[in-house]
Image (tube, rainbow, N blue to C red):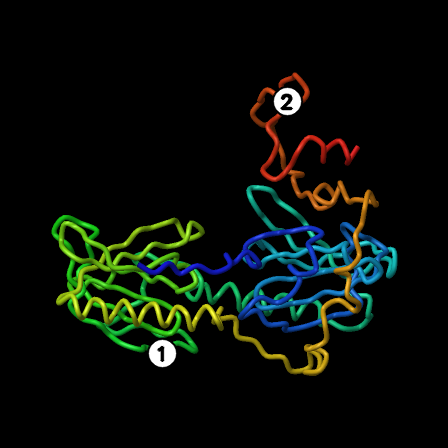
Amino acid sequence: MTSLQYDVLWEDRDVRFDIAPVQMNMRAGEVLIDRLDSVEDTKGNNGDRGRLLITNLRMIWHSQALPRVNLSVGYNCIINIATKTATSKLRGNTEALYILTKCNDTRFEFIFTNLVPGTPRLFTSVISVHRAYDTSKMYRDLRLRGAVVVGNELRMLPREHVVERVNGVWNLSSDQGNLGAFFVTNVRLVWYASMNEAFNVSVPYLQMRSVRARDSKFGAALVLETSLQSGGYVLGFKIDPAERLQACLKQIQSLHRVYAASPIFGVDFETDGRGTAAEMREPILDEPHDDVEVVGGDERGDAFAAYFADGAKQRDGEPVYSEELGLAVEKLKDGFTLSELWEVI
């Protein structure tokens, strides 16, 4: 049995505030695409000059005066991007980038203003990179019954190549099983039914939690468990003879290890005119802050509240009993505590 454990990908699927410096570093496969050194977080830190980092997974903004004041916005959380007029303390009334996000059923709005006049770089970089992310989800998301096989051939993704095709693979999702084939590639494992190409599953290595050989009522089977992020599916496949099953298993495990060391997230981009290679290699923070410990400082208890986008609320939430207050209160949203709400006041 082999478990395919690695750090869970959160960078593109979460909105986080005031993260530690280590979480601002690029993870394996994450690439810094653009770096804008004069951007204001007009919504939450109006009047504060900061730096905006655009990667293939997320946007990171941090204050230049106080880097621990920062935020990380994953592209998977973005539901709308627009340009509107905003009032900046540093530039007055000017065109700004509005980004609406949703994370854990909570909506946040972010407004970024480029403090360098006369350049659309902020808008073009964010919009184009997010579009590239949004159109490449097959690299990162598990898909069931998608249009991935046409005429018994895999519809290839850019930068994808087939390592091996394995025929005679039974899917054990039903009592009688379904005969089909594997496409084993450098980014995912695809199975489809020979009699019905629309009956298929595409599992990126990114979403594989474990793959192993295990006994079943059909005999030895290749059992694949997917991440909780992708639904926590358990998929069983039978390949005869046993030697052929073991060879296929070892190949999938090997390709996953290669992928984990250097993931391909599928976000293709052009960097022309967006900074030199030397600028892209500069450290995210100008100075190391790991040796600084903040004790009882000016904590940002209102970090969440500053970015709320719940103006459309039409009714109160479900009442629940609060042990802390001894009263019935509206149920708090995920990720919030009563103490944090008191700090806002």
**Residue name at image x 53 percent, y 69 percent:** 132
In the image, what residue type sits under mark 1? His
Horizontal side, residue 177 vs residue 10: left or right: left
Residue 287 lies, in percent from the top left, at 80, 67
Instruction: Answer with left or right where residue 194 lies relative to residue 339.
Output: left
Q: Nearer the viewer, residue 257 or 35?
A: 257
- What is the spatial separation of the Cα atoms under label 2 and label 1, in whole angstroms? 55 Å
In the displayed structure image, the side of residue 174 where residue 261 appears, left or right? right
Q: Which residue is mark 1?
A: 161
Residue corresponding to mark 2:
329
Which quarter of the figure has residue 96?
Answer: bottom right
Q: Quadrant of the C terminus?
A: top right
Left or right: 222 as drawn, with respect to 53: left
Residue 274 higher or lower than 201, as above or below? below
Give the residue at the far top of this rendering. 326
Q: Please tell me whether residue 249 is drawn above or below residue 47 in the rendered image.
A: below
Q: Residue at x 62, y 25 (%)?
A: 330
Q: Amino acid at mark 2?
A: Val
Q: Which quadrant of the rendered structure holds the N terminus?
A: bottom left
Q: Secondary structure at mark 1?
A: loop
Q: Residues within 10 Å of mark 2 (few under 14, many from 20)?
A: few
Q: Secondary structure at mark 2?
A: strand
